[in-house]
Image (cartoon, grey):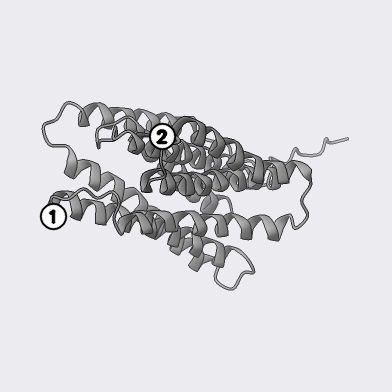
Amino acid sequence: MKEPEIVPDKLSDPINFKIIALIIGGVIGLHIWINFTNDPRIVIYSWSMGVPFAIIVVSFITAKKYFGTLIYSKAFKFLGISFIGIFFGELIYFIYEELLGLDPYPSIGDVFYFMFYPMIILFLRINIRFFSPKHNKIDTITVLGIPITLSGIYVILTTPNEFNFDFGFGLVSIIATTTTLGFAIRAVRTFRGGVIQTTWVLFIIGALSIAIGDVWYYYLEIFEGYSLEHPVNLFWYVGYLFVLYSLLKHRKTL
């Protein structure tokens, strides 16, 4: 009797590690070049605005693709809006530093940066709530435990003698970015074993990298140690590229 044909797993969409190596290698190469060139600022701002802009474009194209669906159209609009905040934050910082010769922190740009957090959390929340409306203790610990733990560590390491803006704004931002990370991990648990599991693994790597960059940055600002050539920028660059890769893979998978 003829054996039945083996149906290939069409739902499998593995991570292309060549792309991962290209992302990490490219970012490290860029950082090395930045630290050995005389005036890297234009390149830095072009990169830090260009990648978020690409995410904005792909997010809204994806939202249009899913027009009329119950979830994806709305969710990807929030993702696009979140990176609009990043884009305008970078643009305002560029104007302050390069055109006005002013210190951009703090400035209106920080309002746009902060806009990233509630919008990305809404993106995650919509996906999680639609596909997994019920949650258990592990989910609660993930969403609440991560921001509480990391924010507590930040407070221990940076608490000044008297309250100041840098500490307060940094603490609020770290609570927001670590909450984002908690929701991202919750999303991976939601889609574990599913057709788009890979896209969420990539997304959480990006979210983790962005969170590390944010926490490190606000720690540096307390002690005035940040510069455009600092290694902390690597985590943002890698994070944005992983989010972009996850977004492109999502479009390809579904």
Q: Is residue 227 visible?
A: yes
Most foreground residue, 188 or 254 = 188
**Rendered image quadrant of residue 231:** top left
Instruction: Classify residue 77 as left or right of residue 38.
Output: right
Q: Position of residue 59 (x, y in %)?
A: 45, 59
Q: Secondary structure at mark 1?
A: loop
Question: Where is the N terminus found, in terms of image quarters?
Answer: top right
Q: Which residue is mark 1?
A: 100
Separation (CA) of disc 2 from disc 1: 26 Å
Instruction: Please state if 31 lies on the left or on the right of 238 as rendered.
Output: left
Q: First in sequence: mark 2 or mark 1? A: 1
* Observer-nearest of 135 and 27: 135
- Residue appearing at x 17%, y 44% in the figure: 42
Q: Residues within 10 Å of mark 1 (few under 14, many from 20)?
A: few
Report the amino acid beneath label 2. Answer: Trp
Q: Which dot marks residue 216?
A: 2
